[in-house]
Image (cartoon, rainbow, N blue to C red):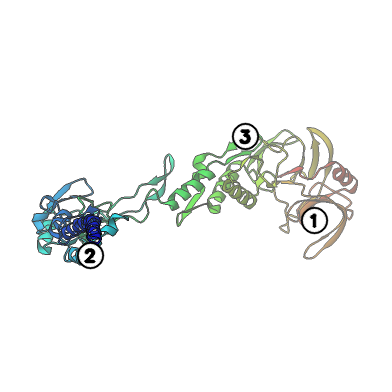
Amino acid sequence: MKYKKIKYLWLFMGMPLVFILLIYIGISLRFLNSFCYGTVINGVDCTGKKESDIRNELIKGLEKYELVIKDREGNKFRMAGRDIRLNWDVGDQLKKIKENQNCFFWILNASSNKVRYQVKINVTYDEKLLQEKIKEYGLLNQTDPIEPLNAYISLEDSGYLIIPEVPGNAIDKNKLEEGIVNALKLRERNIDLVKYGCYDMPEITSESPILLDTMQAIRFFETANITYDFEIEKVELTKGQIDSFIEIKDNIAQISEDKVRNYIVELKDKYDTVGIPRDFVTSDGRKIEVSKGNYGFDIAREVETKWLTQAITNGMWAVREPEYVTRAFQRGISDIGNTYIEIDLSRQHMWYFEKGSLIVDTDVVTGNMSKGYGTPAMVACIQYKQRDATLKGENYSAAVDYWMPIYNNIGIHDASWRSSFGGQIYKRNGSHGCINTPHNKMKIFYEKVEVGTPVVLYY
């Protein structure tokens, strides 16, 4: 009796376990011909679904598939999958996934994360039909081909501008086919031939860093604010002039020293006065014209070229008086002013006026006319002053107490070896070109006259 009770107890306790086991086996058998619990393929939940169902799910939409091809002009060409016998297939990949699953282990997936798989969708199509469709669309038939042009920087009336690139209109056949096939394989619905790079495109566009950097450099140069001060007039460098100095090589902007030099030469042509014809009123009231010589303003071309080039390069703001090789006493219509030395070569006489008042005058002896040493008519200036100088030439050497050179080797000095001055001496017994002056008068000239004083010589 006791054993019978124990038997019934075990049967009572074991029946639920058997029931649970039968349920588990039943669920497992459900997964015998379908995918196990928690199976996800290409984002599709495949739990309990058969291979054929999943295959249809993965290639769903094939019968309605259409690829829209957009060209550069915005034209759209619609290619239906059936036009090229398009087919999608996963091969035996689903079968292999199923074969690797044990339907009795489905409980493992239920207690953990889902098992995800990724299968490749194989795309097939009729190559001949695809080529016919491309031909039908006329995408490769360019009757008026345009070659691509790079964007570039150009100096226009309004200044420097980036001229946009011009894309070519010819389509690369290989790139076109590649793009369409790639879209088909990815089952994409649209392809933009421009974005895919099917057209011949310029290498440099208006957004290329190399052009933007160059434009930034140009804009910086244009910030320079330079004004030249010529006393009677100020000349401000304009943006247009700065732009004209800019030179672009290999898309690198720089200030051309040669172009700046040309500008400085223009300033010299306008503001230099060395050697220009000048109206002059002689001491006896005659109005004459004198020219040549070394007196006047002479802008230092190379100094100013280098300074201005660097100033613009650095975006400098400055008001500048040019550096001069020589400079006159004053600006204006007559830059000789009212302080000057006057030498009448015909009358052999010399005067020194200071602020319009005569300070000293004397007879002189100038260059020997008969030997071709005649002193030239010109407007010169006192270059420097020297005491106790020795003057040397090809066949002479002369010691003087006072020496004031005015032009090349020509100068004003005392001549102790002469006892008389003025008259017609210069015609046959003149100097080698210098202005020989009595010693006592020369002393006064030397003491009174400043370096830079203009010297007007005329016949």
Give the CA separation, mark 2 to mark 3. Answer: 101 Å
167 in relation to 177, above or below:
above
**Which residue occupies the foreground of this view, 98 or 319?**
98
177 in relation to 339, above or below:
below
**Which residue occupies the foreground of this view, 71 or 287?**
71
Q: In the image, residue 3 lies at what x, y percent?
A: 24, 62
Instruction: Say which mark, if any, is on residue 196.
Output: none
**Residue at the front extreme?**
1
Give the CA separation, mark 2 to mark 1. Answer: 135 Å
Left of 115 or right of it: where is 237? right
Give the CA separation, mark 3 to mark 1. Answer: 48 Å
Determine crowd level at label 2: few under 14, some 14-19, many 20+ residues with C-alpha closer than 10 A: few
Element type where label 1 sits in the image = helix
Left of 197 or right of it: where is 204? right
Is residue 436 among the parts visible in the rendering?
Answer: yes
Element type where label 2 sits in the image = loop
Element type where label 3 sits in the image = loop
Residue on which disc 3 sits: 233
Residue on which disc 1 sits: 429
Q: In the image, residue 168 lies at what x, y percent?
A: 27, 54
- Which residue is found at the position 73% from the left and 39% from the top? 329
**Which residue occupies the foreground of this view, 359 or 329?**
329
Kind of residue at disc 1? Asn
Examine the image and state in which quarter residue 344 appears. Answer: top right
Residue on which disc 2 sits: 102
Kind of residue at disc 3? Glu
Q: In the image, residue 372 lies at what x, y percent?
A: 71, 57
Disc number lying in front (3 or 1): 3
Kind of residue at disc 2? Asn
Disc number lying in front (2 or 1): 2
Left of 430 or right of it: where is 75? left
